[in-house]
């Protein structure tokens, strides 16, 4: 257990040794803050007046905060693969994986350690996102239950991105290929959602398979255990595959 | 030096697809021994080392490290090993000290001991002035040292170094060899290389591999003694008789090189001498020379040339590698 945390902390720290993690956090924060600002603007300028007389009008949380989470999920489709590509592919390319594989560690330690390192980053990202609703909480009444549900949803969504990215990174020794293939997988799941919810031939199965449909319920403020189970299965599945892949590396290469 | 075998690898085979890279390989490493694995490029040295360190599984065969089966209990077995692969597995974005403390944690060195162990490794590898620099900014030689520091950090019983001096300048090579000699005092070391003088400089025992097979495995002294199985060039102004020369002690074969008028030239090929292990090289050559003088005097020949031609280690190595002689393992 200790070793898993050792690997996780070192991986997390190493992310910040390169400008990558810093720039991802900064740029994402900047773009999401711009969206946030425009929503606040729109809300105070037009929406508030129009909705003043309407019964059961959408809340400020729904109008301002929820879109931030949705956008964050969409942007991270492209960003997470860049963060996860280095996990194994880069180590293979630089031949540094030997350090871990000749230490007294099992593949489970290595995979979980690296995964946990990414999760720390995801937590940081989600925490930074929470600063935005906090900033307007002085001026308005917010639905914190809904915000926390969205936060949990976003965390699980990004954790599932990370697990699939980690697995695809373990397959190759070319970081770029790892990034492209995990981006492809994530987009494919989005396409499943789009085609599943199309008017002409909607499919419950496609919608269920896509991670975005589960994320949506969280953003609406609903914590459904079946959604949590979906994410956990997704994550565990890919982690097990990655562990198997690392074990197999020793047998055939 | 005890006879306890630290590493016992038996009948290792490894295939990459249809390529049979390592063929029935045996290796025994005893305590306090520096073993050189010598072979040309592509002989299967790296694959062998990867198998011994548990980085790849052998297609068949077993590796026992300090009584621990590497395949059944890899975690325990790997504790006794420090491994430096061909390319030092260092993270370029960390400083040497940071990196070493990470390695220390991976090898479960107690928190309280870590500082001491790291300090020792840094000192032994001469990294004191570089410990707070990013590894990516260090020269190749220093990166190699960080790699070695990583391998010796947890004070393993066995240190396995895969071509540790490749790509270094002569001064760095000298320093690294000195370091390996130093390490050989309290650790067992396996060193792979394709450079013969390197083995000569640091190893007690040498195992020569070619095409995944062991073609020679013995102590260095034995390899040096094969030098005695060498040749002497003799020339006479007058006389010189093949038959008579053939009767000299230790002669295997006599070749007549030239015969112009009265002048003759012979190449005397000596077989490996039996008692040579106890004798100095020089002594052997001296006895041979005096034998030839004596013969020339007895027969009344006029000797005009006597040149001992020692086969260099390089030549022996080449002979072994090019498969002219298949030597059984002396185990």
Image (tube, coloured by chain):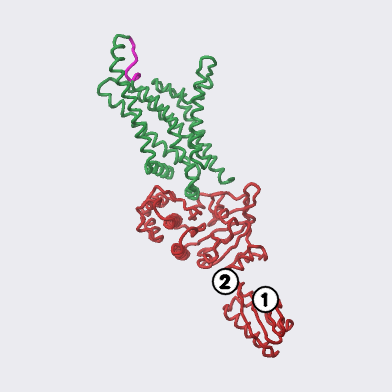
Chain colours: A green, B red
The relative height of residue B253 versus residue A62 in the rendered view (above or below) is below
The relative height of residue A113 versus residue B131 in the rendered view (above or below) is above
Q: Is the N terminus of chain A in the top left, top right, bottom left or bottom right quadrant? A: top left
For this orientation, the residue located farthest to the right is B243
Mark 2 chain? B
The quarter of the picture where residue B44 lies is: bottom right
Visible in this render: residue B61? yes
The relative height of residue A47 versus residue B260 in the rendered view (above or below) is above
Q: Are marks 1 and 2 in contact (CB under 8 Å)?
A: no
Span highlighted in magenta in the image: A55-63
How far across and how far down the image is residue B163, in percent? 51, 58
Element carrying mark 1: strand
Mark 1 chain? B
**Callouts 1 and 2 in the same chain:** yes
Q: Is the C terminus of chain A in the top left, top right, bottom left or bottom right quadrant? A: top right
Q: Which mark is residue B239?
A: none
How far across and how far down the image is residue B64, in percent? 56, 55
Q: What residue lies at 60% left-to-right and 53% top-to-bottom? A: B62
Front in this rendered view, residue A146 or A37: A37
Q: What residue lies at 59% left-to-right and 55% top-to-bottom? A: B42
Which badge, 1 or 2, is on the more N-terminal residue?
2
Q: Which residue is mark 1?
A: B269
Can you tell which of label 1 and label 2 is closer to the viewer? 1
* Crowd class of label 1 (few under 14; some 14 to 19; many from 20; radius 10 Å): many
Q: Which residue is mark 2?
A: B221
């Amino acid at each position: 257990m200790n070793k898993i945390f050792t690997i996780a902390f070192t991986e997390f720290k190493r992310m910040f040794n390169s400008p990558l993690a810093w720039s991802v956090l900064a740029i994402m924060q900047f773009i999401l803050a711009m969206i946030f600002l425009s929503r606040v603007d729109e809300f105070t300028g037009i929406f508030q007046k129009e909705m003043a007389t309407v019964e059961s009008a959408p809340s400020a949380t729904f109008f301002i905060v929820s879109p931030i989470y949705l956008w964050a999920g969409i942007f991270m489709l492209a960003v997470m693969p860049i963060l996860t590509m280095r996990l194994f592919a880069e180590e293979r390319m630089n031949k540094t994986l030997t350090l871990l594989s000749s230490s007294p560690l099992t593949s489970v330690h290595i995979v979980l350690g690296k995964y946990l390192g990414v999760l720390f980053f995801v937590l940081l990202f989600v925490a930074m996102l929470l600063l935005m609703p906090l900033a307007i909480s002085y001026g308005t009444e917010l639905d914190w239950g809904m915000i926390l549900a969205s936060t949990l949803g976003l965390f699980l969504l990004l954790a599932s991105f990370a697990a699939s990215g980690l697995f695809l990174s373990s397959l190759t020794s070319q970081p770029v290929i790892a990034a492209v293939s995990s981006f492809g997988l994530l987009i494919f799941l989005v396409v499943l959602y789009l085609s599943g919810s199309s008017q002409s031939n909607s499919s419950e199965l496609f919608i269920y398979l896509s991670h975005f449909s589960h994320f949506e319920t969280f953003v609406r403020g609903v914590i459904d255990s079946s959604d949590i189970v979906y994410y956990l299965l997704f994550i565990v599945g890919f982690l097990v595959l990655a562990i198997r892949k690392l074990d197999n590396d020793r047998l055939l290469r | 030096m005890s006879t306890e075998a630290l590493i016992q690898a038996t009948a290792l085979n490894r295939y990459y697809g249809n390529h049979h890279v390592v063929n029935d390989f045996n290796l025994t490493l005893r305590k306090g021994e520096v073993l050189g694995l010598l072979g040309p490029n592509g002989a299967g040295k790296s694959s062998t080392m990867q198998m011994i360190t548990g980085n790849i599984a052998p297609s068949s065969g077993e590796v026992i490290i300090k009584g621990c089966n590497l395949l059944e209990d890899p975690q325990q077995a790997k504790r006794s090993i420090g491994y430096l692969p061909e390319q030092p597995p260092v993270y370029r974005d960390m400083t040497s000290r940071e990196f070493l403390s990470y390695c220390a944690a991976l090898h479960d060195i107690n928190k309280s001991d870590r500082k001491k162990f790291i300090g020792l490794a840094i000192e032994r590898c001469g990294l004191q002035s570089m410990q707070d620099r990013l590894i990516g900014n260090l020269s190749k030689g220093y990166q190699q040292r960080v790699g070695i520091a990583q391998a010796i950090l947890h004070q393993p019983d066995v240190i396995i170094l895969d071509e540790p001096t490749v790509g270094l300048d002569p001064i760095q090579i000298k320093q690294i060899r000195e370091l390996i000699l130093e390490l050989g005092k309290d650790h067992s070391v396996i060193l792979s290389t394709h450079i013969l003088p390197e083995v000569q400089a640091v190893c007690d025992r040498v195992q020569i591999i070619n095409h995944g097979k062991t073609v020679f495995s013995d102590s260095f002294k034995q390899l040096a003694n094969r030098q005695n199985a060498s040749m002497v060039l003799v020339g006479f102004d007058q006389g010189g008789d093949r038959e008579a020369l053939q009767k000299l002690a230790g002669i295997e074969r006599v070749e007549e090189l030239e015969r112009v008028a009265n002048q003759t030239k012979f190449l005397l090929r000596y077989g490996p001498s039996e008692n040579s292990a106890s004798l100095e090289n020089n002594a052997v050559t001296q006895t041979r020379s005096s034998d030839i003088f004596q013969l020339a005097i007895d027969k009344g020949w006029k000797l005009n040339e006597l040149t001992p031609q020692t086969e260099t280690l390089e030549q022996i190595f080449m002979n072994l590698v090019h498969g002219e002689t298949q030597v059984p393992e002396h185990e």
